[in-house]
Image: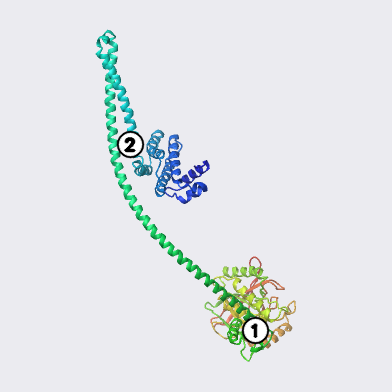
Amino acid sequence: MLTQLEKNKLVSYIKKTPDRNIYVDEVRNILSEKNRNNKNISLVLLSFFSEYTIKKMNEGDVTVNTISRLLTAIITFIYWTRNDNLDIDNNTLYSIRSINRVYKEYISRNSKESSDDVEAMLELIEKEVGKEEITDIAIRELLFKIEELNSEIESNRSIILDLENAIRDKDKVINGSNRKYKRLEEELNGKRKEIERLNALVQEYLCDITRLTNENKGLNSFITTLNSEISGVQNKNKDLLNEIKELTKSVSDLKKRISDLEREIEVIRNNIDLEEDIIEDIIRLLFTGDMTKDELITSLKDKVTYDSFNRLINKARNRVNIGNTSISINPRYSIIAPAVASNRVFDINNSNLTVDLVLTSDYHLTLNNADRNYDLIESLYDYCEDNNINLIINLGDFFGFKYEDLGKYELYRQGKELVNGIIETFPSREGIYHGVLGGNHDEDSLKYGYDSIGMLTKDREDIINLGYTHALVTFDGIRNPLSNILLHHIDRRIKDPIEYDTYNEADYRRYLDIYNRFSNRDAYIHLLGGAHISGLFSNFLLVPSLSCDRRFNGAMRLRIYFNLDSTISNIVIVPLVLGDRVKEVMDISYSKTR
């Protein structure tokens, strides 16, 4: 039996569900576990919705659209009972057959306009159940009515006999009242007409019985055909069950094979993990100093045999091979630090006689401060996007390595972790490139077996490797002191405040003469990072640090204008103060004194 709560939920679901979108699984989910497991639940649902539909139409408390949804549900549950091979009980059949009549009364009583969809569904319902299972019941009902009519006829015949006897005793009747005679005669005529009407009704019922009997024969033939089809389906089902058994056995065999393979993979994985540990041990030992093959094998405490040593040392060499770093070969193995790649030449296209770029310095990125500095770098990218600038140049100390007394191997491991983390997280924008000149902090990584700037630019197409310490920038490949600019990163700070006298300029020129293979006369202007203070004097421009400048944290925008002969005409320098957004301070025009 359905509870009231289940009935309410079912009615709500039918009213909310679009026509012809009722799903059996959704209906089952509404029911309690007991009703879901009831084999006759489809009959229970069909009976409930048939009675509910008739009740609502009799009350007039329903719309034609809702009737349409309810009829959809009834049709769904009729098919459900068929799928479950269930016979519809007589009461439910009478309810279903009454729906058409009650609907017509509802339309007439409430002056409603009928729906073609409802009419079609009523015809479908009549087709599905109106002339099937109810046949035997209808025949029994008609026979019962005929028996009642025959009983009534016999009763009337008894009355007629009494009347005829009364007429025969006409002497007695004549002595009675003529009025009584006429009344009895009228009653007799009325009874005769009633008998004629009843006989006609009996004939009509007999015709119905004949028709229903013929229809019943047709249904029996249809049932026989269905039983034959069911038998065929059952045979196919047996074949499918046999196939399922074979497949189940195959699956069981495959699971066993997979289990065996998983065990083999686990063994291989454990061997790989052990081999990885040995390779790291080899690298760690070589960072402590040069060692021979025998010394390495002894230090590894029999983890490596002579046969496996060459394979493992090659894997260690490939792992350490970062930038120019490598492991030297026999007779003594050692870590070879990368060479400093300095004084590179970097060319910029100059198709419009104007080049616009942004300079900054000293990011000092670590895994701890990256997010804070990224906010400043993102604001710099926003500024470049707003002003159609596609190049940012960092003049050194991109990374902020902190070398404590941890040993060379640990410094090598931590440094690689930092560089790989920055490669994954450093901001980027479509169409904007980031040139990086290595500074003294970046160059420190070379001492510990890896090229930090080489690693960074190898895996990031938007970041350009300018080498370390010094770089010459040309435009359209022209080498001319009046067409080029020089980039530098110094490894010490100047006096604070800047003094515009020959002392500082001479100090810088001596520094550049020692470490810079380019002549001081090779450039229109020298751009220096690493001073941690900004300023412009003579032909030196000190570029501000991103977040650790003693004057202002920020950058500088350079608009470089060229003559027709490709020499630089003048440079407009715009200091940029960084914060939530970039603020331009002023325009400073610079021209080299020739």
| Label 2: which secondary element | helix
On screen, 366 above or below 240?
below
Q: Could you tell me which residue is drawn at 36 percent across and 57 percent down?
A: 235
Q: Residue 390's quadrant in the figure? A: bottom right
Q: Give neighbour class at mark 1: few <14, some 14-19, many 20+ (Cα, 10 Å).
A: few
The answer to whether any part of residue 292 appears in the image is no
x then y, percent, for residue 263: 55, 72
User: Of 558 and 568, which appears nearest the observer?
Assistant: 558
On residue 139, which mark appears?
A: 2
| Label 1: which secondary element | loop
x then y, percent, for residue 54: 43, 37
Q: Residue 124's quadrant in the figure? A: top left
Quarter of the figure that contains the C terminus: bottom right
Label 2 or label 1, whichever comes before in sequence order = 2
Q: Could you tell me which residue is drawn at 28 percent across and 22 percent down?
A: 157
Residue linked to disc 1: 302
Give the CA separation, mark 2 to mark 1.
100 Å
Cβ–Cβ below 8 Å for labels 2 and 1?
A: no
User: Of 403 and 6, which appears nearest the observer?
Assistant: 6
Q: Amino acid at mark 2?
A: Ile
On screen, 258 above or below 127?
below
User: Of 293 and 445, which appears nearest the observer?
Assistant: 293
- Horizontal side of 446 relative to 462 (left or right) equals right
- Horizontal side of 507 relative to 29 (left or right) equals right
Q: Residue 200's quadrant in the figure? A: top left
Coloring basis for residues:
rainbow
Q: Amino acid at mark 1?
A: Asp
x then y, percent, for residue 453: 62, 79
- Horizontal side of 95 relative to 160 (left or right) equals right
